[in-house]
Image (cartoon, helix red, strand yellow):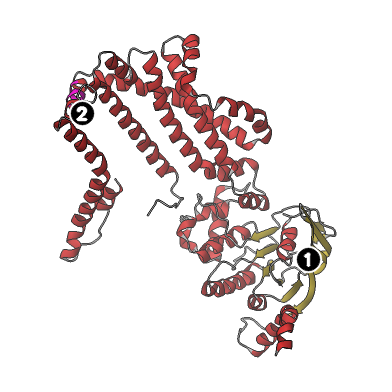
């Protein structure tokens, strides 16, 4: 992605043939990076197909990519897969929105107030390790098998990463900035708005990204157990009929959607946090 | 420019003592410090690291409390931070998510937006960064960032500017440039300047007086007036004589053993 941007916004005035070649060259560089990025998944798919062609894997246990692709196309064309995705996505967005709102509000409150932290810490620490999936029986009892129970599970799962990272981010406020604010007699509300929250933003964004990922995992878990639509249901339904190709379509869809959501949040993070220069690997 | 503080009161320190209690015992940081600093003077405080010179500055800033003695600005005792005293730290402490102008405006309050804009623009010009209002701190060099920090400290028009080793992290070239800048700003603003440094040259180049401190406990060993006209020539005989005198204050004890060996 960044390669394409570089290719588009690259050169200024064109002078010689070297200059004229530059956009082409940066386009080639972008293509190289893209190819490098896709190389490993492509190799895995080729290996998978190859093992099938050699007769080393039984298609009933693991259908080849060609079959999975065909099933993917059939399910997409019939509108079945898009419907399941839409249903799951809606559940995720509902649950995540609730989790993000509660996690941010409570996290900021706890982060700023030591007494609120003391009062809630043990409760949070005790509930946090319980996997959202363990709540499913209770959720079904409380909310039935409708939407509310699933949204509850999703919100619960996404809530804690948002909460914990928000508190962490606020607590990491540099004491040197606290001193600076004291010297300049900055008001508490301004201190929170201009020092604490912007400083906590990277950590908050991490919390949101992890929360969204957990929400996406939770929706599938919730749908595996009690649902009549959704990507999790698609997998469960196919398992009962031993349609492993459909199971794989469901699994790959989950992976792809998770990646897509993360890319979107990462882009939002990039727009929000322009000031940070961090290490991104060699 | 007419942005100088309306008046600059005298700063009276002393006798001032400060003891830190640590888990490992108590440290006697400052002992009976006594300094009278007339308004508008440029005072350099020089001492080895750990001599308590930064503690002294932090007490004047109001960041450090729980000391014995008095510090008064005019007739007002100092009990905490206040806008009549600005501070420039060794690190610029600019907020990385705010632009240069927002960083300078950070300490301004209860002012109409156009007044804020006017003051920020004035002080940006004062520190020679007029074109950088919209830049972010990570786009600035170390010297430029420190200029912004100076502008931020001056924008509230303090009577006293406290400089805590402000050029310690800069390279030698930038450092000399910044020293000249600070002198120029001081001549415009007429604020009282208190500079803490371990750089003897810097102390002489800038100060009307050089306060030499000794370590553990920190005491005032000597107050040396610098009666050289500005701009000062660092390689003039008088300058070098002063440097030698201050040098002797620090290194007599340390160099004595070598003297015996020779």
In terms of depth relative to the viewer, which is nearer, B110 or B206? B206
Residue A199 versus residue A235 in the image, above or below? below
Mark 2 or 1, closer to the camera: 2
Determine whether the residue tagged by mark 2 lies in a helix, strand or loop.
Answer: loop
Spot occupied by residue A168 in the image (x, y as percentages of width and height): 56, 39
Name the chain letter of the residue that bears numbered label 1. Answer: B
Spot occupied by residue A2 in the image (x, y as percentages of width and height): 30, 48
In terms of depth relative to the viewer, which is nearer, A5 or A15? A5
Say which residue appears at 44% left-offset and 34% top-offset: A210
Say which residue appears at 63% left-offset and 28% top-offset: A122
Spot occupied by residue A92 in the image (x, y as percentages of width and height): 40, 24
Spot occupied by residue A124 in the image (x, y as percentages of width and height): 59, 28
Check disc 2 and report the residue beneath it: A57
> Which residues are the magenta region?
A70-74
* SS majority, magenta: helix
Name the chain letter of the residue that bears numbered label 2. Answer: A
Residue B172 horizontal side relative to residue B47, left or right: left
Residue A61 versus residue B4 in the image, above or below? above
Check disc 1 and report the residue beneath it: B10
Whether discs 2 and 1 lie on one chain: the answer is no
Is residue B226 visible in this depiction of the protein? no
Q: Residues within 10 Å of mark 2 (few under 14, many from 20)?
A: some
Residue A38 versus residue B156 in the image, above or below? above
Q: Quadrant of the C terminus of chain A?
A: bottom left
Query: Image quadrant of residue B229?
Result: bottom right
Residue B168 horizontal side relative to residue A80, left or right: right
């Amino acid at each position: 992605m960044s390669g394409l941007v570089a290719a588009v916004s690259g050169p200024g005035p064109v002078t010689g043939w070297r200059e004229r070649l530059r956009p082409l060259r940066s386009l080639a560089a972008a293509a190289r990076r893209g190819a490098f990025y896709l190389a490993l998944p492509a190799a895995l798919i080729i290996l998978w197909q190859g093992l099938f062609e050699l007769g080393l894997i039984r298609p009933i246990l693991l259908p080849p990519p060609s079959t999975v692709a065909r099933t993917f196309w059939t399910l997409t064309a019939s509108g079945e897969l898009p419907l399941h995705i839409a249903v799951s996505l809606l559940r995720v967005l509902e649950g995540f929105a609730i989790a993000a709102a509660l996690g941010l509000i409570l996290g900021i409150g706890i982060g700023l107030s030591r007494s609120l932290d003391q009062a809630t810490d043990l409760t949070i620490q005790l509930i946090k390790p319980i996997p959202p999936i363990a709540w499913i029986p209770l959720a079904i009892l409380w909310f039935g098998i409708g939407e509310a129970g699933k949204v509850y599970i999703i919100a619960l799962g996404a809530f804690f990463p948002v909460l914990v990272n928000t508190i962490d981010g606020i607590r990491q406020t540099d004491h040197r900035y606290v001193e600076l604010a004291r010297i300049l007699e900055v008001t508490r509300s301004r201190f929170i708005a201009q020092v604490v929250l912007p400083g906590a933003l990277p950590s908050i964004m991490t919390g949101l990204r992890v929360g969204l990922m957990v929400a996406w995992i939770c929706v599938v878990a919730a749908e595996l157990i009690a649902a009549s639509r959704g990507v999790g249901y698609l997998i469960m339904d196919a398992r009962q009929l031993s349609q492993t190709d459909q199971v794989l379509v469901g699994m790959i869809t989950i992976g792809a959607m998770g990646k897509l959501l993360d890319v979107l949040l990462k882009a939002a993070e990039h727009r929000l946090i322009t000031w940070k220069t961090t290490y991104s690997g060699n | 420019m007419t942005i100088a503080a309306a008046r600059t009161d005298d700063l009276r320190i002393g006798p001032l003592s400060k003891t830190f209690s640590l888990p490992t015992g108590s440290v006697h940081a400052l002992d009976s410090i006594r300094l009278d600093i007339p308004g508008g003077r440029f005072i350099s405080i020089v001492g080895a690291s750990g001599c308590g010179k930064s503690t002294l500055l932090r007490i004047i800033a109001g960041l450090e409390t729980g000391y014995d003695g008095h510090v008064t600005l005019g007739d007002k005792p100092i009990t905490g931070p206040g806008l009549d005293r600005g501070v420039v730290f060794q690190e610029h402490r600019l907020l990385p998510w705010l632009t240069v102008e927002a960083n300078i405006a950070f300490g301004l309050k209860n002012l109409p937006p156009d007044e804020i804009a006017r003051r920020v623009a004035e002080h940006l010009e004062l520190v020679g960064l007029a074109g950088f209002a919209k830049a972010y701190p990570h786009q600035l060099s170390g010297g430029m960032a420190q200029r912004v920090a100076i502008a931020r400290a001056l924008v509230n028009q303090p009577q006293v500017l406290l400089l805590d080793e402000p050029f310690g992290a800069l390279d030698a070239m930038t450092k000399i440039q910044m020293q000249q800048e600070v002198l120029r700003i001081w001549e415009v603003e007429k604020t009282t300047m208190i500079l803490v440094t371990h750089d003897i040259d810097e102390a002489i180049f800038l100060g009307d007086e050089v306060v030499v401190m000794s370590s553990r406990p920190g005491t005032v060993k000597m107050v040396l007036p610098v009666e050289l006209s500005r701009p000062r020539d660092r390689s003039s005989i008088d300058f070098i004589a002063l440097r030698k005198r201050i040098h002797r204050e620090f290194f007599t004890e340390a160099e004595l053993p070598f003297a015996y060996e020779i």
